[in-house]
Amino acid sequence: MPLDKATKNQIIKDFSREEGDTGSPEVQIALLTARISQLTDHLKIHNHDEHSRRGLLKLVGQRRRHLRYISRKKPDVYRELLQRLGLRR
């Protein structure tokens, strides 16, 4: 269940630092957040899907590592990113 191309391109455009930026932590965190919310909705319907649950936990851990990195390097960007994505910390 990957993100569709239009959604992914919109997220990249909204969170990129400059044109063509797809690898910055901000973009990666935003993409992971979208994927996590998609998987969460899937698991609400299919609550016995353990393979997807494991994938969800891996994505959450990946996002946590990216958030930890950006909180150390750029605390102001970190706070703004949490607010824009609606995450709590």
Image: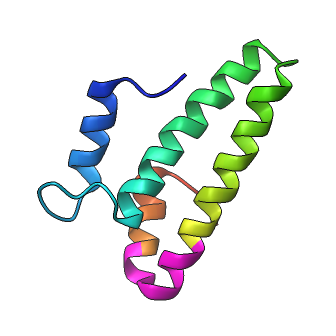
Q: Give x and y (percent) for residue 88.
A: 61, 60
Quadrant in the picture for residue 66: bottom right
Q: Residue at x 74, y 13 (%)?
A: 45
* Part of the protein shown in magenta: 68-77
Q: Is residue 88 visible?
A: no
Residue at 78 percent across and 14 percent down: it is 46
- Left or right placement of residue 65 versus residue 49 in this view: left
Q: Position of residue 78 (x, y in %)?
A: 45, 73
Q: Is residue 69 magenta?
A: yes
Residue 70 in the image: state x and y as whole percent. Answer: 48, 76
Q: Is residue 18 above or below residue 69?
A: above
Where in the figure is residue 11, as x and y percent of width and height?
A: 31, 42
* Quarter-of-image position of residue 51: top right
For the N terminus, the quadrant is top right
Kindly give the residue lying farthest to the left in the view shown.
19
Can you say whether 43 is above or below 11 in the image?
A: above
Task: Name the residue located 29 percent from the left edge and 54 percent from the top edge.
Answer: 22
Q: Quadrant of the C terminus?
A: bottom right
Up-down relation of residue 71 to residue 35 (above or below): below
Residue at image x 67%, y 20%? 42
28 left or right of 33 in image: left
Assess whether residue 59 is covered by the magenta stretch: no
Residue 1 in view of the camera: yes
Q: How many dots with numbers?
A: 0
Seen from the viewer's position, the closer of residues 85 and 35 is 35
Colour logic:
rainbow
Kindly report the secondary structure that dominates the magenta region of the rendered protein.
Answer: helix
